[in-house]
Image: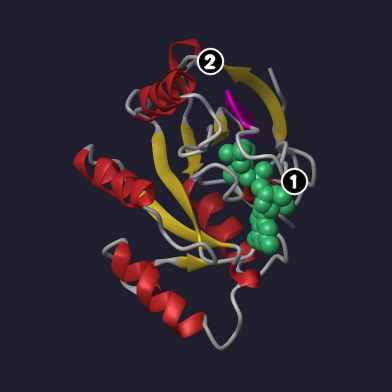
Amino acid sequence: MNRFSEARFIKSVYRAEELEETVAEVAFIGRSNVGKSTTINKVCGKNGLAHASKTPGRTRTINVFLVGKNKWLVDLPGYGFAAVPKSEMGKLDAMFKGYLLSRPTLKKVILIVDAYAGATRLDEEMVMWLDKNNLPFIIVANKCDRVGSNKLQKVYKELSARLGRLPEDIRWVSADKGSGMSDLSNEIADLLELTKENRFRVQ
Ligand SMILES: Nc1nc2c(ncn2[C@@H]2O[C@H](COP(=O)(O)OP(=O)(O)OP(=O)(O)O)[C@@H](O)[C@H]2O)c(=O)[nH]1
Ligand SMILES: [Mg+2]
């Protein structure tokens, strides 16, 4: 049984200061439209839990999903969406960075990049920023379904080199088609120490 089967949305906030303490949480960041919300839905096995959209810049708040007793998944606004005015982008940046720097129970950041479009300069900067701030993170390369099988090896090599990692250190997935998602779901459930019988009540 998926250990996230009782996951539910609990709130959206604009400022990390509005969030209470937890026991453990895992947060998702990445370029706008890279598939953060879709990945959360697949990890939990629940379509429609987080709002995914064809329109980039859909997520503009810090969205919290309760997945265990005082345990959260957190969906953050994406970075690098050109159509969002600079001032607004700065605010979104401050919002997710403020969150990431203020959560002692943050077990892991899931940094999602686009396997088809490739890693961007902003993705590289995010890797450096996470390193600089000693935040533990894993890199997930999404949308692998869009990469032709003859190009996969090249993409594995180039994307991981660009982000200063080895191909085997990156999780290669398709949130849309589901490949690699059950391993990722299990990895995150382990990080949050969710039990097989993960039953809990919202207080
Ligand atoms: N082909 C393909 N499309 C995907 C995949 N994952 C997500 N998408 C599509 O990409 C678009 C954006 O997905 P979202 O999950 O809303 O992306 P997001 O990162 O939450 O976007 P923002 O909230 O705008 O930052 C949607 O149209 C998804 O259906 C994937 O693995 N493969
Ligand atoms: Mg989103």
Locate residue 128 relative to residue 193 in the image: left or right.
Answer: left
Residue at horizontal 29%, vertical 42%? 130
Does any atom of ligand 1 lie closer than 8 Å to the CB of label 1?
Answer: no
Within-10-Å neighbours for mark 1: few <14, some 14–19, many 20+: some
Indicate the secondary structure of the residue bearing disc 1: loop
Residue at 49% over, 45% down: 31
Name the residue beneath numbered marker 2.
Answer: 14
1 or 2: mark nearer the eye: 2
**Residue 49, image x and y in percent?**
75, 38
Residue 120 placement, left or right of 37: left
Q: Nearer the viewer, residue 203 or 120?
A: 120
Above or below: residue 81 compared with residue 177: above
Residue 104: which disc?
A: none
Identify the element where label 2 is drawn. Answer: loop
- Magenta: main secondary structure equals strand
Using a 10 Å C-alpha cutoff, classify the residue at mark 2 as few (fewer than 14 neighbours), some (14 to 19) or many (20 or more). some
User: Is the N terminus in the top left, top right, bottom left or bottom right quadrant?
Assistant: bottom right
Magenta-colored stretch includes residue 66: yes
Residue 88, image x and y in percent? 49, 20
Instruction: Say if the magenta span includes residue 9.
Output: no
Identity of the residue drawn at 51% across and 62% down: 117
- What is the magenta range? 59-67
Residue type of the residue flagged with mark 2: Tyr
Q: Examine the rendering and report whether any part of residue 175 can be seen.
A: no
The furthest residue to the bottom: 150
Return the x and y of residue 174 as percentages of the image width and height. 63, 64
Q: Is residue 193 visible?
A: yes
